[in-house]
Amino acid sequence: MRSLRSRPRPFRLLFAAGLLATVLPAHAALQVGAAVVDVTPDKLPVLLNGGMLSRQSDKIKSRVHARAFALSDGRNQLAIVVVDSCMMSRPVLDEAKALAAQRTGIPADRILISATHSHTAPSSMGCLGTHEDPAYVPVLRARLVEAIAAARANLEPARVGFAKANAADYTALRQWIRRPDRVVDDPFGNKTVRANMHAGRNWDDVTGESGPEDPDLTLIAFQARDGRPIGVLSSFSMHYFGDRDISADYFGLYAEGLKQRIAPNAAAGKPAFVGAMAHGCSGDIYRVDYKVPEAQRNSKITIDEYAAQLADIAVKAYSGIKYQDNADLAMAEARLTLKYRVPDKQRLEWAQRIVAAMGDRLPKDQTEVYAREQIYLHERQQTEVVVQALRIGDMAIATTPTETYAITGLKIKAASPVRDIMVFDLTNGGDGYIPPPEMHLFGGYNTWAARSAGLEVMAEPKITEAALILLEQVAGRPRREVKLSQGPAARTILDLKPAAWWRLDEFAGPLAFDATGRQRDAVYEREVTYYLEGARSDVFCTDGESNRAAHFVGGRLRARLAGIGDRYSVSGWIWNGMPVEGRAVSGWFFSRGRDHGLGAFGDHLGVGGKGGHAGRLIFLQGNDPRSIVAGKSAVPRWEWQHVAFVRDGETVRVYLNGALELETRTPAVFPAGLDQHFFGGRSDNDSNWEGRLDEIAVFDRALSAADVKKLSAR
């Protein structure tokens, strides 16, 4: 996917131009109805989704429900349903929508049905080692129709409002990047797993998180005209808590908690309040923060405590909502045909041998599970997915049909033409994990081809773009430009007039945009992840915005800068993810030399490892390690540090956090006019950087110590 800051393609310009001519209807008299229908199976035991192997339960810990909202503005009507289910197939949901349309008059393409992703809910679709429960599917389908009909029957004049709260302490990345020397095997016997879930438990194995989290707990609240609460639809990016027996997981507990806090008792003759928690983009998210030392992790919290504390945060935000008395509705849907990543001939033959030996029995281990999945993908080849967007007055909802990563939700929200927005995943289908394209390079469970993660590599950008186009359609205006704000540290860089400046805040490659406006864009190599927490948000951004950075996983950022001679400077922020004892050189983060050259010449800057100068800045001219010059201070792992490299003819100075760290004299041994610069690795790819870089600026002159001090934000 191209960066959301890149120029629109011609088709998008034409599309947007048409939208600009659209006249939005005046805000209309909104009606809202809400209802809850029990979808707990009547017969036990029942198969449960959410595990690698087939399992079932004959015990009910908490009942599971469908929570429905029906809306009408007099001209348009729509329905939103949140279901306590791990995932639901598109064909089953299409059948339910068609039946609901016949019964209620709400068009099928104006019905949104989303799974909460409880891993202890009855199985309504096959996934990994579990089949759908044949007795439960018709029960669920019928009760979805009942929920939509009940909500529509409860329509009454209403108001609507939006709120957003920060719940960062309740969500975190579970997908971490493994060290290059700690790659492990996939189910097919290949050593491909560079990133995987929960690898952050062992800090010695990893270099850092693979992406950003989304801390926003968002609410759309509905009130009757007299102020009586009708319901609250919430969304949060946290995968699931984990429970036992048949259970709605934290989603159901949170929904009940909202009801008890806001409107525990129904008014006479009126429907009960409905709370709901939809699953935000959470494919790489879990509740345990592996950045925190194990003894301090919030892993002992119970599911009841977790749900209650989230509900407390929500209610505080709810108390400040300002409501719209009138709100018009708009909704749009797109259906995309996407290919599966089908097995090649060799893998298919491997799978067929294993499945033939299994006979009619279910898989009993991971290898058998994934062998059977290859047969399914080979037989199906492709599938259809549904993407939707809807607008309720000045707020919006966008959907994905998959277990989307948090970064995808952030992409959609950042560019959405409607600022107050929720993004749901596992909506209108259950097509499994959908990593951004770059994550496929790093393997791991979320990428292993199966019905649970089988869509084509480019599925994520296609679904993201579809959601944004639909949002433009329902909003009647084009998407917003995505661009970081400029705090005082950013303005300092501009004031010093760099030859190029890359903020490294992109959502995706291949380009890192030159923030000077000179269009000296750099190019990301493939082995990079994007949009992680960057350096010093307090000084690089404004109004509480988070600065963003790229995480380098062996790839580099390449730039060609003409006119840079033997007097030049490089300023940037480094975040080392590699243990310094992990290899001879912990990592090189800046290099000027020939691409893939032997390193016979060029300037190289990095952090030393077990080969010498462990944890300290090192400078090398050429490729003779005996010529390395080292700094004196330790560079802490997983902490942002400012580094400035200044070459003034034969004099080289390197600064750490504004203070001179090393100084040496060495000729600038590279051909005149050499314009190749590398960040995140050395020119010859020796010991490339494993960690983040941010706010890289190159100057065509030797900076003074005073200039460096300003750049260090000290």
Image (cartoon, rainbow, N blue to C red):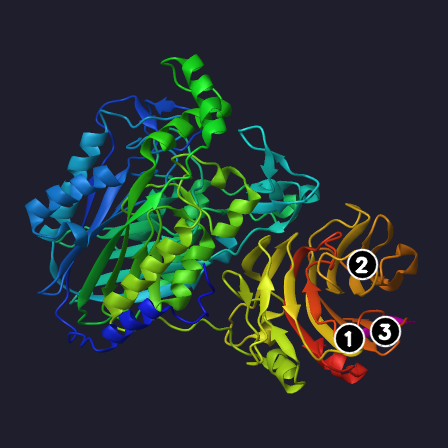
- Disc number at residue 599? 2
Residue highlighted by disc 1: 658
Residue at (54, 58) in percent of width and height: 530
Give the Cα distance between marks 3 and 1.
15 Å
- Residue 96: where, in percent of width, then height? 17, 41
User: Would you identify the image quadrant in which residue 557 lies?
Assistant: bottom right
- CA neighbours of label 2 inside 10 A, class few (<14), some (14 to 19), many (20+): many
Residue highlighted by disc 3: 652
Figure disc tally:
3
Q: Earlier in the sequence, mark 3 or mark 1?
A: 3
Question: Please, is residue 158 above or below residue 299 in the view?
Answer: below
Whether residue 663 is in magenta: the answer is yes
Q: Say whether residue 462 is visible.
A: yes
Q: Main secondary structure of the magenta part?
A: strand
Amino acid under label 3?
A: Val
- Tell me if 85 is positioned left or right of 705 in this view: left
In what quadrant of the picture does the C terminus appear? bottom right
- Residue 574: where, in percent of width, then height? 70, 63
